[in-house]
Amino acid sequence: MRNIPALTWREINATFFSPLAYVVLTLYLFFSGFFFYLILDASRQATMTGLMGILTFLFLVSIPLLTMRLMSEEYRSGTIESLMTAPITDAEVILGKYFGSMIFFIFMLLPTLLYVVILKRFGNPDLGPIFASYLGLLLMGAMFIALGLFCSTLTRNQIVAGVLGIVSLLIIWVLGAVGERMTGDFAPIVRYIGTQQHVQSFSSGRIAFRDAFYFLSFAAFWLFLSVRVLESKRWR
C-alpha cells in the first residue's frame, strides 16, 4: 500500500485541473447557496435542517459527474496500460482514485461552512445537529463516491458511467420510501438499503453507529467490487 499516497496525489492533480470538476463545483455551490437563501428567508430560523436535504439531493447528480471519469478516462486514453504494467496493485489504483476524489469532495463541502458562520452571526443555531449533519454528509459522500467509482470501472464511456452512477444512486435513494410503504418480511431490508432514513438520523442530530456502519460498509463493498472488476480487466 506504499503507492497509495503517490496515486492519490496523481488523482488530486487530475481532478483539480479538470474543467468539469470546477463546473460541477460552481453549480453545486450556486444551487446550495440559492436554496440556503430561500429556506432561510422562508423559515426565519437559524437552522440548516431543510438545506441538508437539498445538499444530499445535489450529491445524487454532482458526485457521479465527478467520478464518471475516474477509470473511464484511463480506459479511453490508454493510460490504464501503464497502470497495469507498473509495480502497483489493483487495490492501490482503486484506493488512490478513491482518496483523491474524497479530498475534492471535502473541498466541495468546506465553502458551505460559511452558511454556519452566517447563522451564528445573525442567530443562535444549535450547532450539534448541524455538525452531526455534516458528518452524515461526509459518510454519505464516501459511499456515493465508491459507487460512482465502481460504475466508472465498468465502461470506457464517461457519459455511460455518469448515467449509471446517477441511476444507481437514485434507486438506493428511493428504496427507503418504497420500504416505508411495503409490508412483509422484506420491508425492513428494503428500508435499510435505502439511503434516506440513514441521512435523516444525522440531520436530526443523532449519530448512530448503525447509520455510520451502513455508509462505511457499503463504501467498502463498492470499492471491493471495483477492485474485482479491475482485476478481471487485467487478465483479459
Image: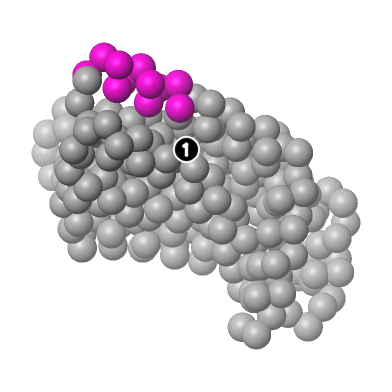
Residue in the picture at 55% in, 36% down: 62
Q: Quadrant of residue 96?
A: bottom right
Task: Please report the residue visible at 19 percent of the width from the left and 50 percent of the height from the top.
Answer: 128
Q: Which residues are magenta?
A: 33-43
Instruction: Please state the horizontal and vertical placement of residue 210, each as a whole percent of the image.
Output: 20, 59
Residue 81: percent from the left, percent from the top? 85, 66
* Residue 109 appears anywhere in the view: yes
Question: Which residue does the image show at 17% across and 43% down from the upper left?
Answer: 126
| 10 Å crowding of disc 1: few (<14), some (14-19), many (20+) | many
The quadrant holding residue 236 is bottom right
Q: Check the image and name the residue furthest to the top.
A: 42
Q: Amino acid at mark 1?
A: Phe
For the residue pair 182 and 6, the one nearer the viewer reads as 6
> For the stretch drawn in magenta, what is the main secondary structure?
helix
- In the rendered image, residue 36 lying in the magenta stretch gets the answer yes
Q: Which residue position is annotated with label 1?
A: 59
